[in-house]
Amino acid sequence: MAVLSVRGLTKKFGGFTAVDQVSFEVEQGEILGLLGPNGSGKSTTFNCIAGMLRPTAGSVRLDGQEIAGLTADAACRKGIGRTFQIPRPFRELSLLENAVLAAHFGAGGAISAAEAEARARDALALAQLPADGQVKGLGAAGLKKLELARALATKPKLLLADESLGGLDQGEMRQAADMLKRIRDQRGITIVWVEHIMGVLLSVVDRVVVLDHGAVIFSGTPGEAQRDERVAEVYLGPPETRAA
Ligand SMILES: Nc1ncnc2c1ncn2[C@@H]1O[C@H](COP(=O)(O)OP(=O)(O)OP(=O)(O)O)[C@@H](O)[C@H]1O
Ligand SMILES: [Mg+2]
């Protein structure tokens, strides 16, 4: 059974349809790349799955159970961990304190202080951050790692990573991709990875879904995505306008 099954997901803001009848599934242990240009509805899709936004229509099932319309904290307790495109850590708290707070909101409900600290330390180690570090001084790549650590501290079965790797250089993007792969390989966590840049993502994900103007325009393997004319059009423009 699919870990995540999204059917006909639609989100309207007034008369504007940001997410339009989106359907896709993610199998246990898969890394799915959710791609699309700026404004195509990727983050809004995440927000509907993770309870930050209430879908206008459609179904979201986690392990077969309907979760559409749950609040964000309820979705988190069900096992959905997510990162935010724009990191907003508690800057006055240490890395460990940030992760401990996240752990308390996590899967399965109330846990002891000792258990929260253990989850937090494990998550920081997985994200390759020092438990005794501070938020101040973290660059773009470090803040992305802290987002991942906070999401991992909630012990998710499904990780929604809104990376949109702005601000990272080529080497840092590679590292971020390798980290997601490690999280899946070592912990068996199912991952949906949002990106607007195709490059490094295609070397790591098992399958790709591409959005344009809120609708799914492609679903298939990374190899198929690279050969698909509609995907090329969305990313590069119509053939006659592309540079030779
Ligand atoms: N709260 C909101 N109210 C009105 N419109 C919104 C709201 N949130 C998002 N939108 C609009 O919905 C569309 C999809 O936005 P979304 O943030 O999901 O795109 P995205 O694919 O994540 O883009 P990016 O790659 O830039 O992160 C955009 O046109 C955006 O302006
Ligand atoms: Mg976004």
Image (cartoon, grey):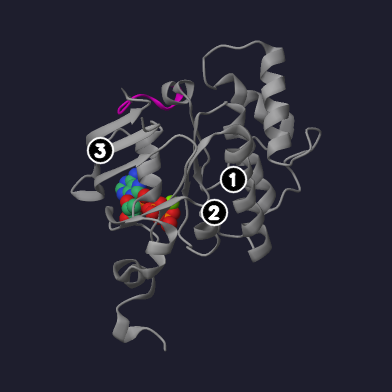
Residue drawn at x 47%, y 63% as measured from the top left: 198
Q: Is mark 1 within 8 Å of ligand 2?
A: no
Q: Is mark 3 within 8 Å of ligand 1?
A: no
Question: In the depicted view, which residue is nearer to us: 28 or 24?
Answer: 28
Query: Magenta residues, as a range?
Result: 67-73
Q: Tell me whether circle 2 and circle 1 mark residues in contact (CB < 8 Å).
A: yes
Name which quarter of the figure residue 100 lies in: top right
Q: Please tell me how crowded label 2 is: few (under 14), some (14-19), or many (20+) other residues with Cα within 10 Å.
A: some
In the image, residue 3 lies in the stretch drawn in magenta: no
User: Which structural element holds mark 2?
Assistant: loop
Question: In the depicted view, which residue is nearer to us: 107 or 32?
Answer: 32
Q: Tell me whether circle 1 and circle 3 mark residues in contact (CB < 8 Å).
A: no
Name which quarter of the figure residue 220 lies in: bottom left
CA gap between label 1 and label 3 equals 25 Å
Relative to 129, say whether 115 is above or below.
above
Q: Which mark is residue 180?
A: 1
Judging by the rendered image, the residue that carries numbered circle 3 is 7
Judging by the rendered image, the residue that carries numbered circle 2 is 204
The amino acid type found where label 2 is placed reads Val
Magenta region, main secondary structure: loop
The amino acid type found where label 1 is placed reads Leu
